[in-house]
Amino acid sequence: MRQTRVVDDAREVACRSRRGVPITARVPTLPLSDHEEAQRPESLAFDAAHGVETASFAAWHTYEPSPPSVVEAVLDALMDRIEGASIDAADCTFIDIGCGKGRVLLIASQRGFSRVLGVDPANKLCRAAEQNVRTWSARHPDATRIDVWCEDASRLTWPKGPLLLYLYNPFHEAVMDRMVRSLPRDRPVWLAYVNPLFAEPLRRHGFALIEEATEVDHYAWKLFRR
Ligand SMILES: C[S@@+](CC[C@H](N)C(=O)[O-])C[C@H]1O[C@@H](n2cnc3c(N)ncnc32)[C@H](O)[C@@H]1O
């Protein structure tokens, strides 16, 4: 049987040669798409600057990190909106729905929220996120506390207080619908949706579109409020 270990841009496959000798072959992974290629320098620079590992995603079908500049732009928009609604960031919980290796959590921990939470059902991604959080917290003792929950976001018990949700296209419409239906109606919820392919459930469940940025194709985002 073949055993596969994924390294950054190639898989190392343990197999046998034609003569039956055990060997390790390096098999290139699929080439990056245009948007992946374009965000890669920024992605690698973020990891190098902070001593974390959030950039590689060759091993994952579902994980792909948001470019740091997109996260900062979305956070700026969220901060403006809560300020405009006279809500203090220190009362809000920021949640990355589908946090992957936790890059968005790290960046959000610098914005003065009461709490930063990442949710992802993939156990290995959660472990990677926790490792990154440990590294980050050691380097940034003033950062907001970050928790990682290894769960399906459509089955959560939501934290108290105003919620700020960040989604980089984590799932398809049926899961989106279930998650949106589960959100609390007794307090403000802002939802930033990057690459917003399945926004219809938001409209169905009473969210209003309040801002959008469409200039960068794959990383277009929309901000909703209920
Ligand atoms: C495109 S990645 C985004 C990663 C991260 N949010 C970022 O922007 O850097 C989508 C993530 O959603 C996660 N995901 C898939 N289904 C999910 C679910 N039901 N609940 C929570 N997260 C989910 C995947 O495991 C993956 O890590």
Image (spheres, rainbow, N blue to C red):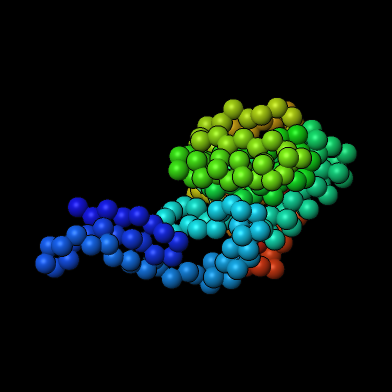
Viewer-proximal residue among 5 and 194: 5
Side of 226 relative to 33 (left or right)? right
Viewer-proximal residue among 58 and 208: 58
Picture residue at 65% right of the left edge, 54% below the top: 50
Q: Is residue 136 above or below residue 87?
A: below
Picture residue at 43% right of the left edge, 65% below the top: 9
Q: On the image, which quarter does residue 85 sit in?
A: top right
Is any atom of residue 88 visible in this view? yes
The x, y position of residue 141, in whole percent, is 73, 40
Viewer-proximal residue among 143 and 176: 143
Q: On the image, which quarter does residue 42 sit in?
A: bottom right
Q: Is residue 151 above or below residue 7?
A: above
Side of 96 relative to 21 (left or right)? right
Q: Is residue 89 above or below residue 217?
A: above
Is any atom of residue 205 visible in this view? no
Q: On the image, which quarter does residue 68 sit in?
A: bottom right
The x, y position of residue 102, in whole percent, is 59, 47
Side of 25 relative to 145 (left or right)? left
The x, y position of residue 202, in whole percent, is 63, 45
Total marks drawn?
Answer: 0
The x, y position of residue 199, in whole percent, is 60, 51
Q: Is residue 197 above or below residue 139?
A: below
Picture residue at 64% right of the left edge, 49% below the top: 104
Picture residue at 61% right of the left edge, 41% below the top: 134
